[in-house]
Image (cartoon, rainbow, N blue to C red):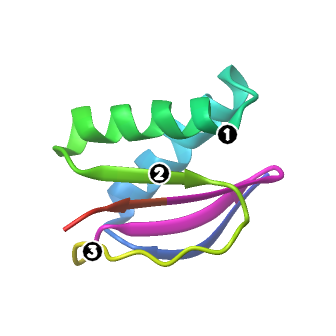
Amino acid sequence: MIEKKKGIMSDEMQRDALQCALLAVNMYKKGINIANYIKKEFNRKHQASWQCIVGSTGYSVSHNSNCYINFTVGKKHIVLFKAP
C-alpha cells in the first residue's frame, strides 16, 4: 500500500517517485539500500542532488522548490527531496 503524505513536485515526478520506491521496497529489505536505489534513480532521471531518507525518526531538510515528497510504502516511511 502506498500513501502520499505531502508532495511538492510535478504529478509526473510524484508518480515516478512512488513507482521507483515500490520497486526498491520489493527489491531490498534494508532502508539504506532502498534509499540508495531511489537516490541513484532520481539523480539519473532528474539530475543530481537528490537525497532520500527511509525511516520514521525526526528530520529537518532544506529542499529546492517543487522537489519534495513524503510518503509510505507498506511500513516504510520515505522522504525524497532535491538539496539546494
State the residue position of label 3: 66
Q: How crowded is mark 3: few (under 14 residues within 10 Å), some or many (20 or more)?
A: few
Q: How crowded is mark 2: few (under 14 residues within 10 Å), some or many (20 or more)?
A: many
Image point 46% across, 38% down: which residue?
38
Q: Which of marks 2 and 3 is nearer the N terminus?
A: 2
Residues rendered magenta in the picture: 66-79
The amino acid on which the numbered mark 1 sits, given as a three-letter code, is: Gly
Q: Is residue 25 left or right of residue 65?
A: right
Residue 54 image point, x, y percent: 63, 51
State the residue position of label 1: 31
- The residues bearing labels 1 and 3 have C-alpha atoms spaced at a distance of 24 Å
Q: Is residue 1 magenta?
A: no
State the residue position of label 2: 52
Q: Nearer the viewer, residue 14 or 71?
A: 71
Residue 8 image point, x, y percent: 38, 76
The amino acid on which the numbered mark 2 sits, given as a three-letter code, is: Cys
Image point 57% across, 41% down: which residue?
21
Image point 42% across, 46% down: which residue?
16
